[in-house]
Image (cartoon, rainbow, N blue to C red):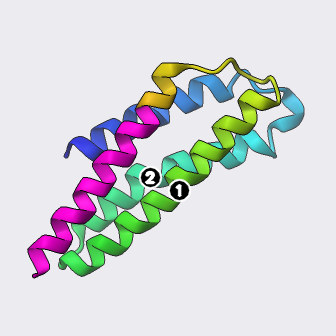
Amino acid sequence: MDVWKQSMELVEVIYKISARFPKEEMYGLTSQIRRAVVSIPSNIAEGAARKSDKEFLQFISIAMGSLSEVDTQYLLSVRLGFVHESKSITNLIRTVAKLLIGTKNYLIRKQV
């Protein structure tokens, strides 16, 4: 699934940039953004393995919530000066969001 592949790419990018966060953020923002970003492909994979589209939809919703956390935490890291804003990261976040919405809409249409 493309949504899973793109979210895995986002995990790699976030791990790389968060490695540059200050050491005092190890148990703060670094930990939080990493847990949130790993949650995205993990929930996609778990939902896809479930037996019903209804369950898959629930996991897609959780992944969307985690993506919103990552987006907010990324913006915070930019505002705090931990990293420079990157259009490629912003675009990747937006791409994953669009793919999640597309997957959600597909699953909803399938149920009708």
Residue 25: % across, % down: 83, 37
**Mark 1 or mark 2: whose residue is earlier in sequence:** 2
Q: Quadrant of the C terminus?
A: bottom left
Rendered location of residue 48, percent (x, y):
23, 63
Q: Circle 2 sits on which residue? A: 40
* Left/right of residue 66 with respect to residue 81 in the rendered view: left
What is the x, y in percent for residue 68? 55, 53
Q: Residue 70, percent across and down?
A: 58, 45
Q: What type of secondary structure mainly makes up the magenta span?
A: helix
What's the amino acid at mark 1?
Ser
Amino acid type indicated by mark 2: Ile
Q: Is 38 on the left or on the right of 9, as rendered? A: right
* Element at label 1: helix
Element at badge 2? Answer: helix
Residue 102 lies in the magenta stretch: yes
The CA distance from mark 1 to mark 2 is 6 Å
- Taking 110 as reference, is 79 above or below it? above
Q: Which quadrant of the structure image shows residue 26?
A: top right
**Residue at point 63%, 24% (across, down):** 17
Label 1, residues with CA under 10 Å away: few <14, some 14-19, many ≥20: many
Q: Quadrant of residue 104?
A: bottom left
Question: What residue is drawn where x is 51% and y is 61%?
Answer: 65
Q: Which residue is mark 1?
A: 66
Horizontal relation, residue 10 to residue 68: left or right? left
Specify start and end residues of the magenta stretch as a single range.
92-112
Mark 1 touches mark 2? (CB < 8 Å): yes
